[in-house]
């Protein structure tokens, strides 16, 4: 394992070179912003018996490879619900924000559900992960379907670097990082990715077990250059949650939002 994506220096998180995204060598990868927000909210507001049920991440501004700060605020703290926000900034201004909902766990209702998400039939990966051409993912990626092929796109993901310093990647942060893959899977076309996402909303029935997270595209709708897509997230034991994204068309090379 090599260095983390970020190094903590006082109140700032300084990105390492491999924190860049695929679109530009001097641009932070958007998935890391969701991971940092999840980390900060979990660090400050997690509590035994409270489950991270939702994380919404707004990615409204691309950022160069600059130090990042994450500020959090407790919005609501009730008997069964806790809501917290995070704001992600550089010295150029705010680049993203997030909101998390934590719900009190209790007894599971009995009886059958009328709709149940089935476990997918994809076994854990056995071969080596894919390697990129111009950009090699700084995480392990196994494609179970080709980009733009008809039908649901499927991948397995596994984090290979710590997010900050040598901290272990928690299950919640791991899910937040994987959720960003909802956009390329649900918005891909035969000629490539023609939509760039502006946000994502992760919902979790339970936290992932183990290092592997599977992502399967289960829906896409678009009109007038605006799209919405959805995926189901799995671990090796079964489905764990869903992720919904909104995106805007970008037929040219993807640049600023």
Image (spheres, rainbow, N blue to C red):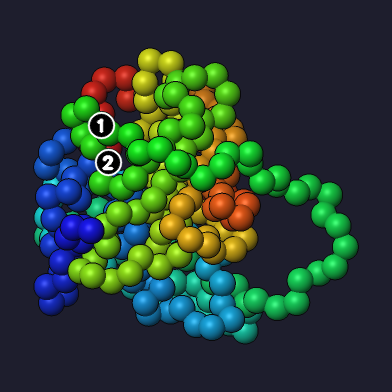
Q: Is residue 3 above or below residue 80?
A: above
Q: Residue at x 11, y 42 (%)?
A: 26
Where's the C terminus, which quadrant? top left
Nearest the viewer among 164 and 252 is: 164
Q: Earlier in the sequence, mark 2 or mark 1?
A: 1
- Who is closer to the viewer here, 9 or 123? 123
**Where is the N terminus found, in terms of image quarters?**
bottom left
Foreground residue, 48 or 144?
144
Point 22% across, 27% down: residue: 133
Name the mark on residue 122: none
- Find the residue positioned furthest to the front: 126
- The reply to whether callout 2 and callout 1 are in contact (CB within 8 Å) is yes
Q: Which mark is residue 137?
A: 2
Task: Tell me which corner region of the image, top left, top right, bottom left or bottom right, holds residue 48.
Answer: bottom right
- Residue sticking out furthest to the right: 111
Q: Is residue 219 left or right of residue 156?
A: right
The residue under the point 13% across, 38% down is 25
Q: Secondary structure at mark 2?
A: loop
Residue under label 1: 132
Mark 2: few, some, or many residues within 10 Å (few <14, many ≥20)? some
Mark 1 secondary-structure assignment: loop
Left or right of 208 in this view: 162? left
Residue 41 left/right relative to 133: right
């Amino acid at each position: 394992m090599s260095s983390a994506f970020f190094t903590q220096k006082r109140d700032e998180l300084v990105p390492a070179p491999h924190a860049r995204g695929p679109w530009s060598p001097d641009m932070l990868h958007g998935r890391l912003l969701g991971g940092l927000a999840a980390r900060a909210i979990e660090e400050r507001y997690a509590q035994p018996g409270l489950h991270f049920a939702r994380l919404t991440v707004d990615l409204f501004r691309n950022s160069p490879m600059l130090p990042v700060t994450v500020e959090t605020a407790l919005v609501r703290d009730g008997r069964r619900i806790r809501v917290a926000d995070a704001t992600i900034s550089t010295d150029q201004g705010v680049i993203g924000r997030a909101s998390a909902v934590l719900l009190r766990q209790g007894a599971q209702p009995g009886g059958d559900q009328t709709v149940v998400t089935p476990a997918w039939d994809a076994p854990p990966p056995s071969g080596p992960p894919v390697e990129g051409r111009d950009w090699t993912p700084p995480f392990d990626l196994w494609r179970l379907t080709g980009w733009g092929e008809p039908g649901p796109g499927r991948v397995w993901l596994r984090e290979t670097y710590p997010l900050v310093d040598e901290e272990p990647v928690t299950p919640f942060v791991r899910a937040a990082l994987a959720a960003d893959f909802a956009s390329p899977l649900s918005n891909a076309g035969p000629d490539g990715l023609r939509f760039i996402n502006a946000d994502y909303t992760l919902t979790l029935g339970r936290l992932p077990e183990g290092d592997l997270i599977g992502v399967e595209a289960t829906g896409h709708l678009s009109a007038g250059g605006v799209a919405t897509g959805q995926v189901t997230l799995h671990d090796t034991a079964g489905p764990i949650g869903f992720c919904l994204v909104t995106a805007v068309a970008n037929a040219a090379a993807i640049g600023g939002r």
